[in-house]
Image: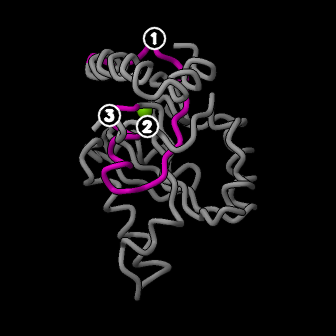
Amino acid sequence: MIKKFIPTIIKHTIYDIDFKDLYDKGKRYLLCDLDNTLIPYDMDLADDKFKDLLKEIKNIGFELVIVSNNHKKRVKRFGDDLNLMTFSNSLKPLKFGLKKALKYIRKKDFPNSKIKDIKKYVITIGDQLMTDVFASSRLKLDSILVHPLKKKTEKWYTRFNRSMERRIIKRFKKEYPSVYEEINEKHEY
Ligand SMILES: [Mg+2]
């Protein structure tokens, strides 16, 4: 069970991800969380730094799709500004939102494939073990965990998830010490 909370890759921020390497390894779609992964809760739109990164990501050949648990107004506003496909109210750790994103990819680029056959092209990016990483594992998708941009502005339900997250990380210490060390080193828990 605790294995399902282990991300495939651990990075400090999205700016530390080697996207070229991911592309070389066959990834083509980034299913990306919004809050505290791309922008903190107290921002509505992308900053120039992220816009530059997005250009780079697109140039490499990726499509970035936003899969967020937040409400439609916030998620769509962010996505429309950057011309990105968005899925809101995703209910991670349920599979609901990520599944919708996978169906969107299939319909657009792999109409004759089964969902399970396109998962190898996909990797998720998010800042929470309890929602982003767990939902990805449940769908057998590779995942990248990043450190939350700004913890101070997190809502009560995210704070609750964080307390659960701390417990899981403590268990990593015993059962998966190398994962524990990597999270500690990159995220300063
Ligand atoms: Mg988040």
Stretch in magenta: 129-156
The residue tagged 2 is: 6
Ligand 1, by image quadrant, is: top left
* Residue 50 falls within the magenta-colored stretch: no
Check mark 1 vs ligand 1: CB closer than 8 Å? yes or no.
Answer: no
- Which dot marks residue 152? 1
Quick check: marks 3 and 2 in contact, CB under 8 Å? yes
Instruction: Name which of mark 2 and mark 1 comes first in the sequence.
Output: 2
The residue tagged 3 is: 2
* Element class at badge 3: helix
- Specify whether residue 43 is in view: no
* Residue 142 falls within the magenta-colored stretch: yes
Residue 108: x and y in percent read 46, 78
- State whether residue 185 is above or below residue 146: above
Instruction: Name which of mark 3 and mark 1 comes first in the sequence.
Output: 3
Amino acid on which the number 2 mark rests in the picture = Ile
Residue 98: x and y in percent read 35, 55
Quick check: marks 2 and 1 in contact, CB under 8 Å? no
Nearer the observer, disc 2 or disc 1? 2
Residue 9: x and y in percent read 57, 41
- Specify whether residue 72 is in view: yes
